[in-house]
Amino acid sequence: MLDLAAALNIVSTLSLIGALIFAGLQVRTANRVRAEQAALAMIQSIQSEGWTHALSLMLRVPVGVTVEQIDALGPDVARAIEDYGVRIETVGYMVFRGIVALETVEQLLGGIITLYWSRVKPWIERDRKRTTSYRQYEWVQWLVERLKERQAGLTAEPAYIKHSGWKQSDASPTG
């Protein structure tokens, strides 16, 4: 009878361990699916015709431009800066809340986000002072600062260099 009790105890313990492993794998899969869905939702919400139009206008703003020079580019550029900024603001908040990984944003949009900020920062800072609303584009600035922290001391290689040896088999849906 003792052997039967010991055997049942072992079976019970192994079943419990198996259930815990299965639950862990299920949680891991669910987290990956959630992250992928969040990334897709982010892409769908920001990369639209409006996004493309705003980007094309915003790229007309030269690097090192003054606030007055940005104003001289006209109201279409100002609207593009605002439209683009609002979309990036949402992305920054999504990263902060853990809905989208910073690494995902860095790989998909990091370059264009830091480019945007480098061109429009003086204009936004002037607007913050003028309106006394220092929270304008707060998540854009926060996100840019996080992206720069990740790149500090590193050479941020573009994907076409970093992943030049990539093969289809490298794209694993499980990790």
Image (cartoon, rainbow, N blue to C red):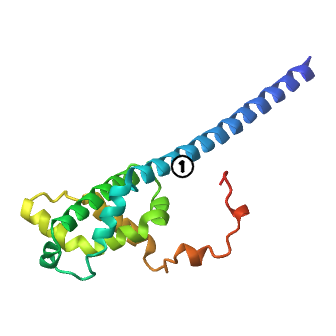
- Image coordinates for residue 30, horizontal then vertical, percent: 58, 40
Q: Residue at x 15, y 70 (%)?
A: 74
User: Is 84 on the left or on the right of 41, as rendered?
Assistant: left
Q: Nearer the viewer, residue 25 or 40?
A: 40
Residue 56, placed above or below residue 32: below
Name the amino acid type tagged 1: Glu
Q: Can you say which quadrant of the picture contains the C terminus?
A: bottom right
Picture coordinates of residue 126, whole percent (x, y): 13, 69
Horizontally, residue 8 falls left or right of residue 67, namely: right
Residue at 81 percent across and 25 percent down: it is: 9
Q: Secondary structure under badge 1?
A: helix
Mark 1 neighbour density, 10 Å: few (under 14) some (14–19) many (20 or more) = some
What residue sits 86% from the left and 25% below the top? 6
Q: Is residue 23 above or below residue 135?
A: above
Q: Quadrant of the N terminus?
A: top right
Q: For the image shown, how many numbered marks are present on the structure?
A: 1
Quadrant location of residue 49?
A: bottom left
**x, y percent for residue 38:** 47, 47
Q: Quadrant of residue 68?
A: bottom left
Residue 123 x %, y %: 17, 71
Which residue corresponds to mark 1? 36
Horizontal relation, residue 84 to residue 156: left or right: left
- Above or below, comparing residue 170 to residue 66 in the picture: above
Furthest toward the top, the residue is 1
Which of 162/7 is in front? Answer: 162
